[in-house]
Amino acid sequence: MIVFLGEIEAGETAVELLEDYCYFRIYFEAQNTPRKLKSMFGSIEDGVKQPLETGESTLKSLRAYIFGLRSGTVPTPPSGWKLETDEHIPNLASIVQKPVSILDAF
């Protein structure tokens, strides 16, 4: 993903592009297909038996989303949407809210 963002010279907009893509992946299964967030027997955060996508398919999806974003054909997050305050994914939001330092990697 980082290499692709470098190829398109995303620069300072890289974070915004990734946040928009996160919104798209959480709320949509495909370009015009909203994701069913509330199920009868679980939640969106429940695990699955098999991975939904490989790394290659995720990169392909990101490429398609960014090119669609540039042409105005894909949904964008509402103004003010933040991953850390989304009420549909409380467990993920709590992880995103934690402060991170580059020193945590060492």
Image: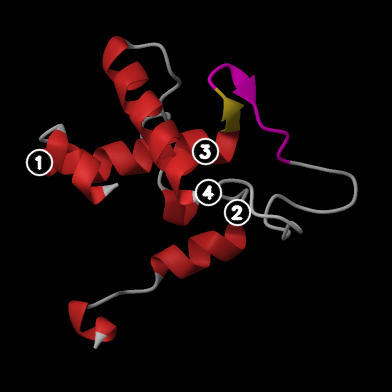
Sequence-earlier tag: 3 or 4: 3
Front residue (pair 11, 8): 8
What residue range appears in magenta? 31-37
The CA distance from mark 4 to mark 1 is: 26 Å
Residue 66: percent from left, percent from top: 32, 27
Q: Circle 4 sits on which residue?
A: 54
Pair 3/4: label in front: 4
State yes or no: residue 10 in magenta: no
Sequence-earlier tag: 4 or 2: 4
Pair 4/1: label in front: 4
Q: Circle 3 sits on which residue?
A: 25
Residue 80 relative to residue 89: left or right: left
Give the amino acid type for the residue marked by disc 1 in the picture.
Answer: Gly
Give the amino acid type for the residue marked by disc 4 in the picture.
Answer: Thr
Pair 2/3: label in front: 3
User: Tags 4 and 1 in contact by the CB under 8 Å rule?
Assistant: no
Front residue (pair 94, 45): 45
* Label 3 residue SS: helix
Q: Circle 1 sits on which residue?
A: 11
Residue 64: percent from left, percent from top: 39, 25
Q: Residues within 10 Å of mark 2 (few under 14, many from 20)?
A: some
The disc at residue 89 is 2
**Does residue 71 lie above or below 16 as drawn?**
above
User: Tags 3 and 4 in contact by the CB under 8 Å rule?
Assistant: no
Residue 5 relative to residue 53: left or right: left
User: Tags 2 and 3 in contact by the CB under 8 Å rule?
Assistant: no
